[in-house]
Image (spheres, grey):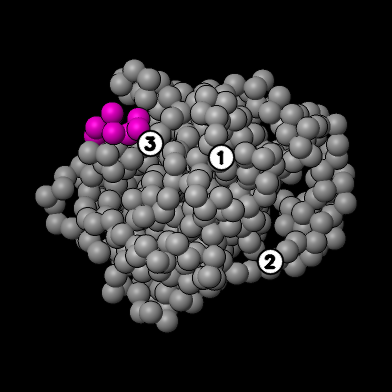
Amino acid sequence: MNYYSLNNRENNPVDFKEATIRGQAPDRGLYFPKDVPVLPDDFIENLHRYSNEEIAYRVIRPYTGDTLPEAELERIIYETLNFEQPAVEAAPVEDATGPVAHTQPFEFPLKKVTPNLSSLELFHGPTLAFKDVGARFMSRCLGYFVRGNNRPVTVLVATSGDTGGAVASGFYDVDGVQVVILYPSGKVSSVQELQLTTFGKNITALEIDGSFDDCQKMVKEAFADADLQKNLFLTSANSINVARWLPQQFYYFFALQQWPYKEHPPVISVPSGNFGNLCAGMMAWLSGLPVAHFIAACNANDVVPIYLQTGNYQPKQALPTLSNAMDVGNPSNFVRILEIFNQQLPSLQKILTAYSITDEETREAIKSLWKHHHYLADPHGAVGALALQRYLTEHPGEKGLFLETAHPVKFYNTVEPVTGDRLTLPAAVAALTHKEKQSKKMDARYSELKDFLLSYR
């Protein structure tokens, strides 16, 4: 499998290894696979007969090509999907005083919420967010690829919330890899901040005085800086990296593996910020996975909903919302979605609908799901659920699922006042409560980031 830059199809293609190490093409374009593999019908029809590991291997193997030996890929997949966190008794985070919950093996349960609406829970990993899978997969691929290098790789990543913690966890103590995470000061939840700032060792957190878009812009400038590239072995762990982005297809296969309505493919609602997860779902669909329709569930950052309605794509400054991981005004991965549909808006509109949900509507959705269905959603999942409910109201007879992308405890200060109930504290969060935040504050200026990176090596 070869990958080309979306800025220039004719440039020399690269394999999975080089695309992973580079993160972004030299011309600043995102890498995209030259071919999208189509999986056999009998595999798709019999997903329930396969283990998660077998499904993941069949899905990702065409993308890795011969860059990973079979046994190595099997090991990476196993470590990506299988782990248990130790049960840690500790004091709860401030204002979240429920009991500490012992964790369970990582899994992806599809839970029925209403007769027509289900939730695919993707928060049972070490940082309680869907990004754990992509971060663990990429960290192990990169660790394998850089064995024997005479200088460390610097992973540079911007986060709007959950990516930072997942990357920090996935790459912690990986030999030959240093990680620098940029996050917007005051714009991530307290739990998210603890998850990305308390590791130490090879993980460094930079607290940027600005928005996520500012952080993302600084990272992109770093990758475009030829002088920096000469001095550092630099790559990214955002969803722009193929090794972070492509494994997210697994979720959609795991969902269909559990989907009970075999004659009715689901409508899938994806909480969307940088659009990597939704784009991965569309790749799974291109590979043969039956999906009736996709929904981009957005918060007040409505660049894509407006585009689908008007044909006018106009990036904006990101607005802060309760669903902070989706606070993106210029989503990087949307260019990949456009590539899938050959830049043809009418073709995209046939399979994708987008809704913009306000903070007040998000609160009401959390309250309604809890009160009427006893289902506890985080703000991102609530946006996904409400967007799906709107679509199903407009399309009676359809059934669907939304992705619950983060554990509600990560947003306890939003969820608890709405539900009126104290949250049970997972051990993965309890373990953080005695740790101290370690971050370096920085202005949203690229020159400061460059100086830091050159001194950091």
Residue matched to label 2: 105
Residue 389 visible, this orientation: yes
Q: CA distance from mark 2 to mark 3?
A: 34 Å
Q: Amino acid at mark 3?
A: Ile
Sequence-earlier tag: 2 or 3:
2
Quick one: quadrant of the C terminus? bottom left
**Residue name at image x 64 percent, y 34 percent:** 382
Along the horizontal axis of the image, is 50 left or right of 94?
left
Q: Relative to 110, is 382 above or below? A: above
Residue contact at pointers 2 and 1, CB within 8 angstroms: no
Q: Position of residue 35 (x, y in %)?
A: 24, 57
Extent of the magenta region: 343-350
Quick one: quadrant of the N terminus? bottom left
Residue at the far left: name it. Answer: 10
Circle 2: element type: loop
| Mark in the foreground, 2 or 3 | 3
Q: Position of residue 392 (x, y in %)?
A: 55, 30
**Residue name at image x 52 percent, y 70 percent:** 50
Residue at the far bottom: name it. Answer: 71
Q: CA distance from mark 1 to mark 3?
A: 15 Å
**Residue name at image x 46 percent, y 23 percent:** 302
Q: Amino acid at mark 1?
A: Lys
Looking at the picture, tell me which residue is in the foreground, 337 or 141: 337
Sequence-earlier tag: 2 or 1:
2
Residue 399 circle label: 1
Circle 1: element type: loop
Q: Residues within 10 Å of mark 1 (few under 14, many from 20)?
A: many
Along the horizontal axis of the image, is 345 left or right of 48?
left
Magenta residue check for 364: no
Q: Residues within 10 Å of mark 3 (few under 14, many from 20)?
A: some
Q: Residues within 10 Å of mark 2 (few under 14, many from 20)?
A: few
Q: Relative to 170, is 403 above or below? A: above
